[in-house]
Image: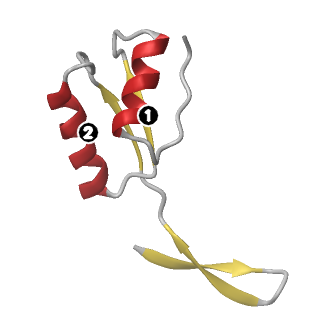
Amino acid sequence: ETSKIRNSDRGGFLPSKTMIIASWNIRGFNLPLKHQAMQSFLQSKEVNVIAILETKLNNVSIGEIMRRKFGEWKFIHNF
C-alpha cells in the first residue's frame, strides 16, 4: 500500500510505503523445515522487520543459519 506524506521542506508530497513488522516464536529454528517456512512467510508477506523469539539456539548457530539462509537480511541478537 502506497500513500503520500507531506514534505514540508519542499511544499510537496513524497510517496511512502507501509512498513511491515512481524514477530515469531519459532521453537526449533535449527530445523531446515523451519528455515523454509520463514523464508516463504517473509517473501509472501513482504516483511521489512522480524523478531525471532525463543529459538533455543546459541550465538554460533543463529549466526550460521542467518548468514547461510537469510544472507540479505541484517540481524542482531541478545546472546
- At label 1, the amino acid type is Arg
Query: Residue at left 27%, top 21%?
Result: 29
Near-viewer residue (32 or 47): 32
Q: Specify few, some or many for label 1: CA neighbours under 10 Å numbering under 14, 14-19, or 20 or more.
A: few
Query: Residue at left 14%, top 30%?
Result: 33
How many angstroms separate mark 2 from mark 1 (CA)? Answer: 14 Å
Q: Please identify the quarter of the rendering in which residue 50 is found.
A: top left
What is the secondary structure assignment of the residue under circle 2?
helix
Labelled disc at residue 38: 2
Residue 57 in the image, given as x and y percentages of width and height? 37, 11
Labelled disc at residue 45: none
Relative placement, left or right, of 27 versus 8 is: left
Near-viewer residue (51 or 76): 76
What is the secondary structure assignment of the residue under circle 1?
helix
**What residue is shown with label 1?**
67
Q: Specify few, some or many for label 2: CA neighbours under 10 Å numbering under 14, 14-19, or 20 or more.
A: some
